[in-house]
Image (tube, rainbow, N blue to C red):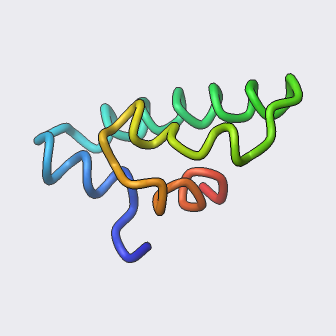
Amino acid sequence: MIESIVTVLMIRDKMSEEEAQKQVRECRAELMQRLGSGEDIDDCYNICEEWFGLKPDYLWGLVNC
């Protein structure tokens, strides 16, 4: 993914960098919690859509941030 989730939120939603980073951290924390409780990564496939309205392509950017 060329654009990071933070960049997309800043441009599309006119968020500050701090706001966008906070949302990404919260989403990533939920993802890690779900994975830690036994959900498979495939079960979390749509988390970027749920949180940000973004395609699942952004999932790996979230995992690797």
Residue 30 lies, with reference to residue 47, above or below; the image says above
Residue at 46% in and 38% down: 24
Say left or right for 43 vs 39. Answer: left
Residue 46 lies, with reference to residue 60, above or below; the image says above
The quadrant where residue 18 appears: top left
Query: Hey, which residue is sitting farthest front in the picture?
Result: 43
Residue at 34% in and 49% down: 54
Residue at 53% in and 32% down: 27
What is the x, y in percent for residue 29?
Answer: 64, 29
Q: Nearer the viewer, residue 4 or 43?
A: 43
What is the x, y in percent for residue 37?
Answer: 86, 23
For the N terminus, give its image quadrant.
bottom left
Residue 43 lies, with reference to residue 5, above or below; the image says above
Q: Nearer the viewer, residue 24 or 37?
A: 37
Q: Total marks drawn?
A: 0
Say left or right for 33 vs 4. Answer: right
What is the x, y in percent for residue 36?
Answer: 86, 29
Residue at 43% in and 31% down: 22
Say left or right for 63 vs 33. Answer: left
For the C terminus, give its image quadrant.
bottom right
Say left or right for 21 vs 45. Answer: left
